[in-house]
Amino acid sequence: MATEVAHKGVAATHQDFEELREDVSASPLWNRDLAPTSINERTWSTWNIAALWIGMSVVITTYTLAGGFIEAGMNWWQAMLTILLGNTIVLIPMILNAHAGTKYGVSFPVLCRASFGTKGANIPAILRAIVACGWFGIQTWIGGTAIDALLTAIWDDWGNLFGGAMVADVALHTWISFLLFWLIQVFIILKGIEGIKHLESWSAPLLLLGGLILLVWASSKAGGLGNVLSQSSALQKQANSFWTVFPGALTASVGYWATLSLNIPDFTRYARSQKSQMLGQALGLPLTMTAFAFIGVAVTSATMIIYGEAIADPVQLIQRFNSALVILFAMIVIFVAQLTTNMAANVVSPSNDFSNLNPKLISYVTGGLITAVTGILMMPWQLMSSMGAYIFTWLIGYSGLMGAIGGIMICDYWILRRKQLNLAALFDTDGIYSYSNGFNWRAIIALVIAIAPVIPGFTRAAATPGGQVAAPTFFDTIYTYAWFVTFAIGFVIYFVLMNGHESLKEEE
């Protein structure tokens, strides 16, 4: 039965999957959250997948992304094309990795067992989880500042709470807002994955409407969209040429969602069909990212005309409004934007990843709580200390890790295994995916070799204020292409080391 189910994929019946669950439920690698989704659980339509991406893309970090590229020397349309190209590129591994999730109903860490081994899968899973924790902290910090701004706007004494006391150079009332937003997210974590599905589907129209209203307001107040965009060049803080900025900006654009390109099976395991996941992602990701980044550039440019200064942070912009009703609506939109992104992009994956460490002890909810605590410990206020450090150290830096893992996964599933997995063996400690004591050293070696060339560039960027090295060396140049470099090396090295391996023969 197990082998039969493995090769039926989405065509398998609900009974088939229930029998498979019963067969492997005693395995130490199994719990109900990591178990393959049954056919009856696959309820996400094309709209649900598209709404997922709309909800994750419409967020303050997207709003400010293009502004960071313009600061470095691009003009507005060059920044838009770079973001569109980067998101179109990352859509390819996104759809490829999503395939296994839809066909076999497996999550990211379970899929990694095929290439890294039943124990070795924890290596890419935890690397992915750590990045997600950092992102969770960043989005929670921004969401907390939005709540802080809302309370300041509607309650005159909020800004003077506790006599304006400061902790670590941050007002105490800001820390309270941060904690409040964090607690709201913990409440949603306790509701599980279905809560996230409904949150994304209902919030997507609100987020699109909020962005459109903001763009219309800015254009009308600043004399039209053409006049607004003509002011965007004033956002440039450096005189770099386009081709100097482009490699790093493109890699950052790819790196922005390089994380989700790995763990997208965490969501597509609930998709109704391959068509739903492919069409939903194609419609929801590149266009939404580019459109909302454009709104960020246009509105920031408009603020120079309206207020005489560039206001890149929408939270600070909204505080300039006089109407309490307008402020309330705007803050609700920002609050929902941060919430939808964080719940989907930065909770689902690490929850599964931490659960994979010890499936019998750590559930999805427990993994989510670990994520929430770790996100605070990573001090997100430091990660967002400057736009240059955010783009050239954070985004590009972790893209090197994600690219290597993605190259190995895609080579394993699409090239070597030709989309065929033994589903039951993914939960078998002594099966074909156990390799050597649970570790596939070929995948680990490929991962290390792939990452090695970008480490010197990363260390130099991390040690440089703003992340941009003044006199780039050969390794600095390689680092600006981190995702592309590590993806290609990981793919090729893994193919060479694994070609002809006995685990591939057993699946033929």
Image (cartoon, rainbow, N blue to C red):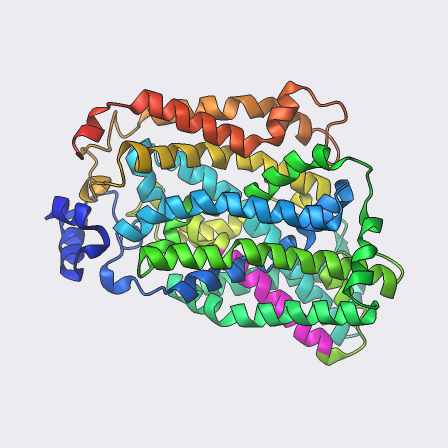
Is residue 246 visible in the rendered image? The answer is yes
The percent coordinates of residue 252 (x first, y second) are 61, 41
| Above-or-below relation of 193 to 77 | below
The percent coordinates of residue 13 (x first, y second) are 16, 59
Find the magenta span and give its range.
Answer: 326-344
Q: Furthest-right residue in view? A: 308
Q: Furthest-front residue in view? A: 226
Q: Is 316 displayed left or right of 437 in the figure?
A: right
Numbered label tally? 0
Question: In this view of the protein, which residue sits in the foreground, 427 or 479?
Answer: 479
| Above-or-below relation of 508 to 36 | above
The percent coordinates of residue 430 (x first, y second) are 18, 33
Question: In this view of the protein, which residue sits in the foreground, 304 or 139?
Answer: 304
User: Residue drawn 59% across and 31% down?
Assistant: 481
Q: Is 265 displayed left or right of 132 in the figure?
A: left
User: Residue drawn 82% across and 71% down?
Assistant: 221
User: Residue drawn 20% across and 56% down?
Assistant: 11
